[in-house]
Image: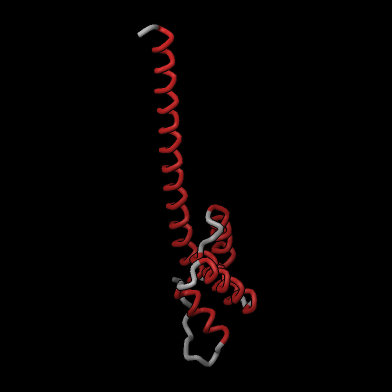
Protein backbone atom coordinates (compact mmCIF):
# COMPACT_ATOMS: atom_id res chain seq x y z
CA UNK A 1 0.00 0.00 0.00
CA UNK A 2 1.42 3.36 -0.91
CA UNK A 3 1.47 6.45 1.27
CA UNK A 4 -1.38 8.26 -0.55
CA UNK A 5 -3.62 5.21 -0.23
CA UNK A 6 -3.06 5.00 3.53
CA UNK A 7 -3.89 8.71 3.88
CA UNK A 8 -7.18 8.14 2.04
CA UNK A 9 -8.01 5.15 4.23
CA UNK A 10 -7.08 7.11 7.36
CA UNK A 11 -9.26 10.03 6.26
CA UNK A 12 -12.19 7.66 5.66
CA UNK A 13 -11.71 6.13 9.10
CA UNK A 14 -11.53 9.56 10.68
CA UNK A 15 -14.68 10.66 8.85
CA UNK A 16 -16.46 7.51 10.06
CA UNK A 17 -15.29 8.14 13.62
CA UNK A 18 -16.45 11.75 13.49
CA UNK A 19 -19.84 10.63 12.21
CA UNK A 20 -20.13 8.05 15.00
CA UNK A 21 -19.10 10.58 17.64
CA UNK A 22 -21.67 13.08 16.35
CA UNK A 23 -24.35 10.37 16.46
CA UNK A 24 -23.42 9.47 20.05
CA UNK A 25 -23.41 13.14 21.06
CA UNK A 26 -26.91 13.58 19.63
CA UNK A 27 -28.08 10.53 21.59
CA UNK A 28 -26.57 11.90 24.80
CA UNK A 29 -28.12 15.32 24.16
CA UNK A 30 -31.48 13.62 23.58
CA UNK A 31 -31.15 11.83 26.91
CA UNK A 32 -30.28 15.10 28.64
CA UNK A 33 -33.35 16.75 27.09
CA UNK A 34 -35.53 13.82 28.11
CA UNK A 35 -34.23 13.98 31.68
CA UNK A 36 -34.74 17.76 31.75
CA UNK A 37 -38.34 17.40 30.60
CA UNK A 38 -39.09 14.65 33.14
CA UNK A 39 -37.61 16.74 35.95
CA UNK A 40 -39.50 19.82 34.77
CA UNK A 41 -42.78 17.91 34.75
CA UNK A 42 -42.12 16.56 38.23
CA UNK A 43 -41.26 20.01 39.62
CA UNK A 44 -44.19 21.63 37.80
CA UNK A 45 -46.62 19.18 39.40
CA UNK A 46 -45.23 20.08 42.83
CA UNK A 47 -45.55 23.78 42.07
CA UNK A 48 -49.13 23.31 40.89
CA UNK A 49 -50.01 21.42 44.08
CA UNK A 50 -48.49 24.23 46.16
CA UNK A 51 -50.30 26.87 44.05
CA UNK A 52 -47.07 28.34 42.66
CA UNK A 53 -48.52 28.62 39.18
CA UNK A 54 -46.03 31.14 37.78
CA UNK A 55 -43.08 28.89 38.63
CA UNK A 56 -44.83 25.86 37.17
CA UNK A 57 -45.75 27.74 34.01
CA UNK A 58 -42.18 28.93 33.47
CA UNK A 59 -40.81 25.40 33.81
CA UNK A 60 -43.43 24.01 31.44
CA UNK A 61 -42.94 26.68 28.80
CA UNK A 62 -39.18 26.08 28.86
CA UNK A 63 -39.80 22.35 28.48
CA UNK A 64 -42.18 23.14 25.62
CA UNK A 65 -39.30 24.77 23.75
CA UNK A 66 -37.49 21.42 23.81
CA UNK A 67 -40.55 19.28 23.10
CA UNK A 68 -43.23 21.31 21.35
CA UNK A 69 -45.63 18.38 20.96
CA UNK A 70 -46.00 17.07 24.50
CA UNK A 71 -49.48 16.14 25.67
CA UNK A 72 -48.28 16.15 29.29
CA UNK A 73 -46.96 19.69 29.10
CA UNK A 74 -50.10 20.99 27.38
CA UNK A 75 -52.31 19.26 29.96
CA UNK A 76 -50.42 20.78 32.89
CA UNK A 77 -50.58 24.24 31.30
CA UNK A 78 -54.32 23.67 31.02
CA UNK A 79 -54.56 22.78 34.70
CA UNK A 80 -52.72 25.98 35.60
CA UNK A 81 -55.06 28.10 33.51
CA UNK A 82 -58.10 26.35 34.88
CA UNK A 83 -56.92 26.94 38.45
CA UNK A 84 -56.41 30.60 37.55
CA UNK A 85 -60.03 30.71 36.38
CA UNK A 86 -59.26 30.82 32.66
CA UNK A 87 -61.46 27.88 31.69
CA UNK A 88 -61.60 28.61 27.95
CA UNK A 89 -57.81 28.86 27.72
CA UNK A 90 -57.51 25.68 29.80
CA UNK A 91 -59.79 23.89 27.34
CA UNK A 92 -57.53 24.97 24.47
CA UNK A 93 -54.54 23.45 26.24
CA UNK A 94 -56.46 20.24 26.92
CA UNK A 95 -57.50 20.05 23.26
CA UNK A 96 -53.90 20.67 22.17
CA UNK A 97 -52.80 17.81 24.41
CA UNK A 98 -55.39 15.55 22.81
CA UNK A 99 -54.31 16.66 19.34
CA UNK A 100 -50.79 15.46 20.14
CA UNK A 101 -51.93 12.29 21.88
CA UNK A 102 -55.63 11.48 21.28
CA UNK A 103 -55.77 8.83 24.02
CA UNK A 104 -54.10 10.93 26.73
CA UNK A 105 -56.53 10.29 29.56
CA UNK A 106 -55.59 13.17 31.92
CA UNK A 107 -56.34 15.80 29.25
CA UNK A 108 -59.51 13.97 28.26
CA UNK A 109 -60.66 13.87 31.90
CA UNK A 110 -59.85 17.53 32.43
CA UNK A 111 -61.58 18.63 29.23
CA UNK A 112 -64.69 16.63 30.10
CA UNK A 113 -64.72 18.12 33.59
CA UNK A 114 -64.59 21.68 32.23
CA UNK A 115 -67.23 21.05 29.59
CA UNK A 116 -69.62 19.10 31.81
CA UNK A 117 -69.40 20.71 35.24
CA UNK A 118 -72.07 18.39 36.64
CA UNK A 119 -70.38 15.22 35.44
CA UNK A 120 -69.26 14.22 38.92
CA UNK A 121 -65.59 14.65 37.99
CA UNK A 122 -64.18 17.15 40.45
CA UNK A 123 -60.49 16.34 40.67
CA UNK A 124 -57.82 17.82 38.41
CA UNK A 125 -55.84 15.14 36.58
CA UNK A 126 -52.14 16.04 36.65
CA UNK A 127 -51.22 12.92 34.70
Give the residue at x 46% y 66%: 46
Q: Position of residue 40 (x, y in %)?
A: 48, 58
Q: Quadrant of the N terminus?
A: top left
* Quadrant in which residue 17 is drawn: top left
Side (left or right) of 111 relative to 5: right
Q: Quadrant of the C terminus?
A: bottom left
* Quadrant in which residue 8 is drawn: top left
Compare residues 57 and 104 and report the one nearer the observer. Answer: 104
Give the residue at x 48% y 85%: 122
Count of number-bearing discs? 0
Does 64 sit above or below residue 100?
above
The way the protein has been coloured in the rendering is: secondary structure
Does 77 sit above or below residue 36?
below
- Give the residue furthest to the left: 1
Does 123 sit above or below residue 101?
below
Q: Position of residue 76 (x, y in %)?
A: 52, 69
Q: Position of residue 57 (x, y in %)?
A: 57, 63
Side (left or right) of 54 relative to 7: right
- Give the residue furthest to the bottom: 118
Compare residues 99 and 42 and report the one nearer the observer. Answer: 99
Q: Position of residue 33 (x, y in %)?
A: 47, 49
Compare residues 69 and 40 and report the one nearer the observer. Answer: 69
Give the residue at x 53% y 56%: 67
Give the residue at x 59% y 64%: 54
* Quadrant in which residue 13 is drawn: top left
Amino acid sequence: MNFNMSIIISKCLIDDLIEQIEFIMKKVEGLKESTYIKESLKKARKYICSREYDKAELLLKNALIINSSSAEIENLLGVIEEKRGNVLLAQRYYRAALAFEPCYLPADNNLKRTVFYNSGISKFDLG
